[in-house]
Image: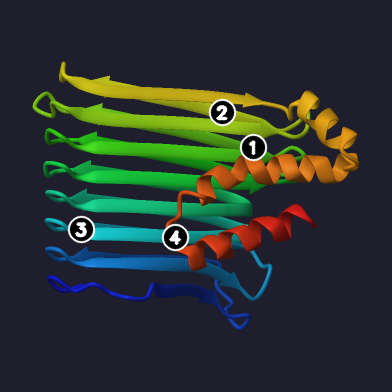
């Protein structure tokens, strides 16, 4: 995206795998570059015609120049028999903004790895992830945000709803360079365990070499609040619908951060669809 260009509509990318494809290994390399004061949104989705076993690796480099603004949405849903590895490296210049929203549903096996380098003053990155998993699905997230300049800000927010014997893992790191004073780093991961067999593994990390910073991290996991279920049932809602409402309300907090109403509705529609199947 060239200098000063403000793209009015989201760019849509479909990773489409035809039923005629006979291979089992796909490697995808992309590069996104926004010049000074450029702005765009990108919506990406995987589509597989067949349920054959595929190992899909996606390597994405993002570079944002001064005052550039990128919002990226990724819908990764119902990829049976697929092993997916997403690696993203982003470099942010002065006053640039990068926001990412990922919705992962029933991926057989997936690893999302992101490294974000905040190289310019007042750069901001926000990483947001929803995981709605069941059966034997496994999803691992590894995020590393490097505050390399002063007055930078970051946010990491992950919410997981885990059914059956699904497993989710989150490893998030905030690194603050010695010269990166006035850093503001935030990290939070929460998981809703909906069966005795589901598991959530969390490893938050802070590595700070500056003394004038504000960094925090938190992680929690647990079952649905029985008092809330009782309250909903006392209002005439059956137990199954009450649990669905609790799950949707839990995950909706991430979706509500999306500013684009049309994209927000797509995510809510997907959440409602899977929550009622």
Of helix, strand and loop, which one carries label 3?
strand
Q: Are marks 3 and 2 in contact (CB under 8 Å)?
A: no
Which dot marks residue 63? Answer: 3
- Going from the N terminus, do you reach mark 3 or mark 1 first? 3
What is the secondary structure assignment of the residue under circle 4? Answer: strand
Decide: few, some or many residues near mark 1? Use Cα within 10 Å; few <14, some 14-19, many ≥20: many
Residue position marked by numbered label 2 in the rendering = 201
**Residue at image coords 64%, 76%:** 49
The answer to which image quadrant residue 28 occupies is bottom left
Position of residue 157 relative to residue 208, above or below, is: below
Label 3, label 1: how far apart the Cα atoms are: 32 Å
Spatial distance from mark 4 to mark 3, Cα to Cα? 17 Å
Please give the name of the residue rendered at 20% of the width and 50% of the height, measured from the top-left corner.
Answer: 91
Q: Where residue 155 sits: x, y (%)? A: 35, 38
CA gap, disc 4 and disc 1? 23 Å
Q: Which residue carries the number 1 mark? A: 167
- The residue carrying pointer 2 sits among few (fewer than 14), some (14 to 19) or many (20 or more) residues within 10 Å by Cα, namely some
Instruction: Work out how far the residue at label 3 is from the one at label 2, CA to CA, in angstroms.
Output: 31 Å
* Above/below status of 20 relative to 110: below
Mark positioned earlier in the residue sequence (4 or 1): 4
Give 128 or 141, whichever is nearer the viewer: 128
Residue under pointer 4: 73
Residue 257 % position (x, y): 46, 49
Question: Which is more foreground, mark 4 or mark 1?
Answer: 4
């Amino acid at each position: 995206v060239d200098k000063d260009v403000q793209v009015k509509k989201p760019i849509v990318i479909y990773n489409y795998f035809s039923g005629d494809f006979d291979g089992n290994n796909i490697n995808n390399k992309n590069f996104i570059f926004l010049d000074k004061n450029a702005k765009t949104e990108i919506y990406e989705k995987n589509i597989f015609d067949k349920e054959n076993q595929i190992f899909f690796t996606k390597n994405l480099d993002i570079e944002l120049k001064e005052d550039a603004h990128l919002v990226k949405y990724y819908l990764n849903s119902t990829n049976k028999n697929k092993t997916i590895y997403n690696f993203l490296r982003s470099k942010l210049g002065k006053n640039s903004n990068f926001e990412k929203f990922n919705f992962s549903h029933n991926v057989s096996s997936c690893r999302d790895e992101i490294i974000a380098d905040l190289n310019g003053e007042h750069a901001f990155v926000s990483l947001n992830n929803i995981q709605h998993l069941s059966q034997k699905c496994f999803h691992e997230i590894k995020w590393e945000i490097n505050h390399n300049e002063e007055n930078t800000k970051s946010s990491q927010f992950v919410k997981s709803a885990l059914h059956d014997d699904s497993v989710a893992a989150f490893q998030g790191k905030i690194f603050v360079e010695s010269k990166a004073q006035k850093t503001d780093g935030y990290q939070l991961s929460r998981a809703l365990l909906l069966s005795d067999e589901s598991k959530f593994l969390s490893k938050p990390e802070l590595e700070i070499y500056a003394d004038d910073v504000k960094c925090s991290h938190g992680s929690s996991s647990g079952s649905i609040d029985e008092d809330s279920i009782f309250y909903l049932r006392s209002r005439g809602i059956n137990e199954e619908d009450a649990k669905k409402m609790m799950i949707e309300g839990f995950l909706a907090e991430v979706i509500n951060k999306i500013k684009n109403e049309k994209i927000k509705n797509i995510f809510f529609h997907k959440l409602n669809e899977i929550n009622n199947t």
